[in-house]
Image (tube, grey):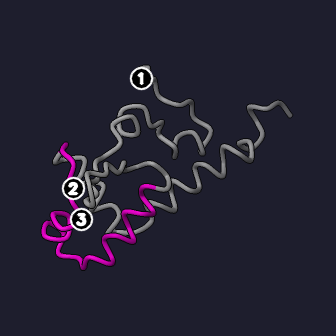
Amino acid sequence: MNAKDGPLGRDEAEEYASWFKALADATRIQIVSLLARRRAPMSVGEIVAASGVGQSTVSHHLKILADVRFVLVERQGTSAFYRINDACVTCFPTAADVVMGNPAPETPVCE
């Protein structure tokens, strides 16, 4: 059996699993969608107001999304602003395709 016929390497599989896990919640999908569509940093309060979800819940979900770098945190004094990670949106391979053995789609070079 050659490498192409075998499973993904363990490190790559664990990374993809962390991405799928981070997106395995409807509220996190809504937050990612909101930040991707706004294309501007938002405070937790703004995300709470837009999503209708409580502050502690939003903060919990933002931490999970930041841990896998789907969102980035910008600190300004005592405030934190969250934005979508453009590199993630632009350069993120279609993980499901890769897991299923299809080649990763062509992606632009990220800086």
Q: Position of residue 61 (x, y in %)?
A: 38, 68
Of the pair 110 and 2, the residue shown nearer to us: 110
Q: Earlier in the sequence, mark 1 or mark 2?
A: 2
Crowding at label 2, few (<14), some or many (≥20) Cα neighbours within 10 Å?
A: some
Of the pair 81 and 15, the residue shown nearer to us: 81
31 over 2 or under it: above or below: below
Where is mark 1, residue-wise?
111
Type of amino acid under label 2 = Leu
Left or right of 108: which side holds 31?
left
Of the pair 46 and 5, the residue shown nearer to us: 46
Please say whether residue 60 is one of the residues in the magenta stretch: yes
How far apart are the alpha carbons under marks 1 and 2? Answer: 24 Å
How far apart are the alpha carbons under marks 2 and 3? Answer: 12 Å
Nearer to us: label 1 or label 3: 3
Furthest residue to the top?
109
Residue at 71% of width from left, 45% of height from top? 11
Where is mark 2, residue-wise?
34
Q: Dividing the picture into quarters, in which one does residue 45 lie? A: bottom left
Type of amino acid under label 3 = Val
Q: Earlier in the sequence, mark 2 or mark 3?
A: 2
- The stretch in magenta equals 39-66
Residue at 26% of width from left, 76% of height from top? 55
Nearer to us: label 2 or label 3: 3
Please say whether residue 20 is one of the residues in the magenta stretch: no
Q: Are marks 1 and 3 in contact (CB under 8 Å)?
A: no
